[in-house]
Image: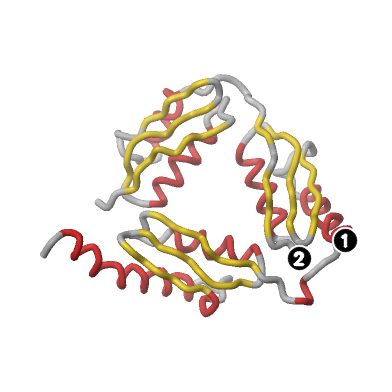
Amino acid sequence: MSPSREVAMQDPALELDVIEELAWDPRIDATAVGVDAEEGTVTLRGTVSSLRHRRDAVKVARRVRGVLRLRDELEVRLPPAHRRDDTELSSDVLQALTLDTAVPTTVNAYAQHGVVTLMGFVDWHCQRLASEAAVANVLGVREVVDLIRLQPTGTADPVAFLRAARRAGLPSCVSLEATDGTVTVNGAVHTLSDHDRALALAWSTPGTVAVNDRLSVVPA
């Protein structure tokens, strides 16, 4: 049997694994999410009722073993009762940002037709992610546009990244190059979870303002 045919035969099993993982998570309406799998690439399609549900579905699918790449083609279609006018939604979004202690006061936002735009600047990428998460949970938000800028907090140190990567159990071939705050992650890992961990470590490296992902996910 040729390698390509063997991979193709494995895809229905991967598709079923993702479907079952989505169905197992009580946060997700798995009946609204269609799943296709081809050569390790999983595509999510369908219509969900909130941005939080979309983010949850993507997060769950990414953790399934055997998923090498993920395409998010889900559409958020708010129920009529969840649609808000811009002024009311903007007020609730700003309140959510203010109440989240992980979000700096330098972050601002406005809403237009259910789309929230984040602005301002932060020191760390995790603060940008916290801002996105806080806003995604607000009723009536269907999309987030993140324009938050990162301020450099020093000089990116590849050696520090490598130490953290080894402690995290990432393969020794994973490496990082840094130029003027832009870091490039190179190498190969066997799971999408390891890929995401490597990028998270890159973003956590002091001085990082942008990350180039050149990390391959290949089956073991």
At x 44% / y 64%, what residue is drawn? 43
At x 41% / y 29%, what residue is drawn? 176
Q: Is residue 192 above or below residue 32?
A: above
Residue 140's label in the rendered image is 2
Q: Quick one: label 2, few (<14), some, or many (20+) residues within 10 Å?
A: many
Query: With 45 as the anchor, is 78 left or right in this view?
Result: right
Residue 51, image quadrant: bottom right
Please state the horizontal and vertical placement of residue 189, each as a whole percent of the image. Answer: 33, 44
Residue 61, image quadrant: bottom left
Please state the horizontal and vertical placement of residue 99, each as a whole percent of the image. Answer: 79, 50
At x 68% / y 53%, what residue is drawn? 144
Query: With 2 as the anchor, is 47 left or right in this view?
Result: right
Mark 1–mark 2 contact, CB under 8 Å? yes
- Quarter of the image with the N terminus in it: bottom left
Q: Secondary structure at mark 1?
A: helix
Residue 143's label in the rendered image is none
The residue under label 2 is which amino acid type? Gly
- Tell me the CA gap for discs 1 and 2: 10 Å
Q: Which residue is mark 1?
A: 88
Query: With 5 as the anchor, is 32 left or right in this view?
Result: right
Q: Secondary structure at mark 2?
A: loop
Specify the color scheme: secondary structure
At x 69% / y 62%, what residue is drawn? 142
The single residue placed furthest to the bottom in the displayed view is 31
The residue under label 1 is which amino acid type? Glu
Please state the horizontal and vertical placement of residue 103, each as a whole percent of the image. Answer: 72, 43
Please state the horizontal and vertical placement of residue 215, each as a whole percent of the image. Answer: 38, 40
